[in-house]
Image (cartoon, grey):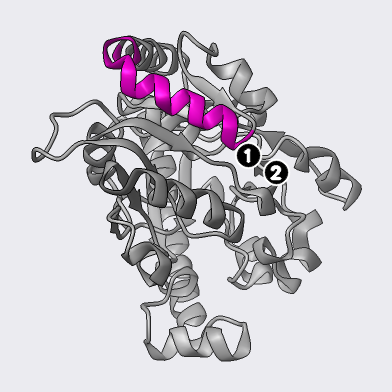
Amino acid sequence: MRILFIGDDWVGSNARSLAEGFRQAGHDVIVVDSTAVTLPARLSPSWWHAKVSDRRSPRRIAAVHRAIDRAAAEFDPQVVFAFKAIHLDQQRLLGTPAAVHIHYSPDDVANPDNVSADYLAYERDWDLIVTTKRHNVGELCERGARRVRFVRSAYDPAWHHPCAHRGSRRFLVGFIGARRPDRHDLLLTLAREHGSDFQLRGPGWRRVPALWLTGAAVSGPAYGEDFSHAVAAVTANLVLLNSANRDTHTCRTFEVPAAGGLFVGERSAEHSELLDEGTECFLFSGRAELCDILDRCESEPDRMAKIAAAGHRRIVAGRHRYVDRAREIVDVLG
């Protein structure tokens, strides 16, 4: 099929990986980058506009739609696929000539932060809505969505794979992910307890003064292959869920074991379905259980390496790449 894919196209973005997944599945794909609207550069006029008005820059939105219109006129797509395009003009997206219009929602659409008034006004007009949240399926149907498909998150073999360790510094425990209120206390406690044996990477953490004196290695995001480099330096790689999205799994669920890291994650039904606890991963439901796991990681490094390897084999053999998700979505179309 000819697929006009609209989504953020920066290196390491999930949208870029899914677009590549459709290409790898044998489809003809043209990508229109929406990053200028979705993630305006920090301190830029567009960034300030979003902060002050809680709306994206009309000028940036118009520029993206001009690019969509040009691509559609030249490409004559059969499918318009929009990856979390909630800040774009929904009427113009749905009016782009194509047989099928699909919207992909990687986050909880019951969370007001993950929708817009314009998106909600036109949600029922999309031919198919794809969600990575199982609990969103019934909720979307109740809101009037025509057709809904649940697919899990995924990993991208181009970025997420075992790799050689960079540098001599190793960490007992680490986490890669954005700063969020539901993660703050746990990660600050781990930083204080483990100091230089703790690695924390992601947006926002360097702006937490309490972390500065812990001795932990705190740095910015790890995107693309840099993610796998960061995983390789850590024995116990934490997989934390986003309570604001009511997560039962997340992208890290697949990315950490795909990169060869030992999966140490919050206990959930989906985590238990995907990996066998004790032989392919470790799961915890509170700090006491996590502390016990970390003690074992420190005292039994050889066993931990074997469990990490078993988790890696389970995920890479389980059809959890973006190309596999692309095929699942296409199968819905018949």
Query: Could you say whether the residue bearing mark 1 is in a helix, strand or loop?
Result: loop
Q: Quadrant of the C terminus?
A: top right
Give the label on residue 128, or none.
2
The numbered mark at residue 109 is: none
Front in this rendered view, residue 135 or 323 = 135
SS class, disc 2: strand
Judge whether residue 226 is colored magenta: no
Compute the Cα span from label 2 to label 1.
13 Å
Note whether 111 is above or below 176 in the view shown. below
Taking depth in this image into account, of 197 and 133 the one nearest to the observer is 197
Q: Main secondary structure of the magenta part?
A: helix
Question: What's under tag 2, amino acid-wise?
Answer: Leu
Which span of residues is magenta-colored?
286-305
> Position of 172 compared to 15: left or right?
left
Query: Which residue appears farthest toward the right when viewing the image?
Result: 142
User: Residue 200 or 32: which is nearer the viewer?
Assistant: 200
Residue at the image point whose x is 44% and y is 70% from the top: 39
Question: Which residue corresponds to the image point at 51% horizontal and 78% vertical from the top-left?
Answer: 61
327 displayed left or right of 67: right
Q: Nearer the viewer, residue 328 or 110?
A: 110
Q: Nearer the viewer, mark 2 or mark 1?
A: 1
| Label 1: few (<14), some (14–19) or many (≥20) C-alpha neighbours in 10 Å | many
Query: Would you say residue 334 is visible in this rendering?
Result: no
Query: x, y (%) of residue 313?
Result: 37, 11
Question: Residue, x 39% and y 54% (percent of image)?
Answer: 31
Position in image of residue 311 (x %, y %): 41, 15
Q: Can you say whether 17 is above or below 263 in the image?
A: below
The reply to whether residue 29 is visible in this rendering is: yes
Residue 291 drawn at (x, y percent): 49, 31
Residue where numbered disc 1 is placed: 132
| Residue 171 location, quadrant | top left
- Amino acid type of the residue tagged 1 in the rendering: Thr
